[in-house]
Amino acid sequence: DQQVKQNSPSLSVQEGRISILNCDYTNSMFDYFLWYKKYPAEGPTFLISISSIKDKNEDGRFTVFLNKSAKHLSLHIVPSQPGDSAVYFCAARGGSQGNLIFGKGTKLSVKP
Amino acid sequence: EPEVTQTPSHQVTQMGQEVILRCVPISNHLYFYWYRQILGQKVEFLVSFYNNEISEKSEIFDDQFSVERPDGSNFTLKIRSTKLEDSAMYFCASRPGSLFTDTQYFGPGTRLTVL
């Protein structure tokens, strides 16, 4: 029962190019989405979020797009840097107390 | 910048033993959470805590688990009798409770190894 799906376990991108990480969800009641970055042996670090009343949110090199009709969101990183290499998790706000439902993650490798 | 801290970073225990994992959430936050990540799997919600009581819990959070906020700063997760399958990274998270953000901030995690 995967309510949040990240179908690409890994992505490799050249430095300076765009990285696009995708996420799909099944529950149309989800109204808030977040992206976290995680390095090995560390906790998830918040990157960017988007409310369902918007279709785009931008913060520096990071932009999140939300397509509610397709139940799809994506994270764009432009330009990609080697330091961006990490596992990226998509999460949706679940229950009434804000617990997060995570995807399985996509490992991004940015090659110099 | 304020951050969530967790101790210990790694805990090794024998099956059947009790363990307590400790967290210090960000000081002005109101909501507290525990998540876990079994190796190679996704991060899973365990429990949320607000106003000194459990507000929501998952199916994973059975009678073997309990949480407590014993003072104004610490937030603990206790596993009464550990099983091999409890081996995982345990993450504590907190969020402000503001109407304007639902962002949760995570600690670095405690790696629990049950032998």
Image (cartoon, grey):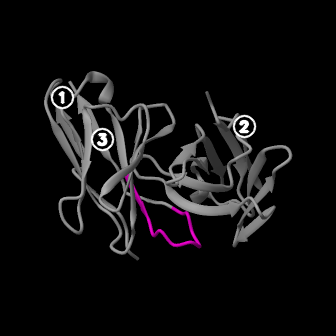
Q: Position of residue A108 (x, y in %)?
A: 63, 46
Q: Which residue is mark 3?
A: B111
Q: Which residues are the magenta region?
A: B92-103
Residue A6 visible at all: yes
The amino acid beneath tag 2 is: Thr
Q: CA distance from mark 1 to mark 2?
A: 36 Å
- Name the amino acid, label 3: Arg
Q: Residue at x 48, y 31 (%)?
A: B40
Q: Quadrant of residue A56?
A: bottom right
Query: Which one is in front in this view, the residue at disc 3 or the one at disc 2?
Result: 2
Q: Nearer the viewer, residue A78 or B80?
A: B80
Please tell me whether mark 3 sits on a helix, a strand or a loop: strand
Spatial CA distance of label 1 from label 3 is 17 Å
Q: Which residue is mark 2?
A: A26
Residue B26, image x, y percentages: 35, 69
Q: Check contact, mark 1 vs mark 2: CB within 8 A.
A: no
Q: Residue at x 39, y 32 (%)?
A: B60
Marks 3 and 2, how far apart at CA: 31 Å
> Going from the N terminus, do you reach mark 1 or mark 3 first?
1
Q: Amino acid at mark 1?
A: Ser
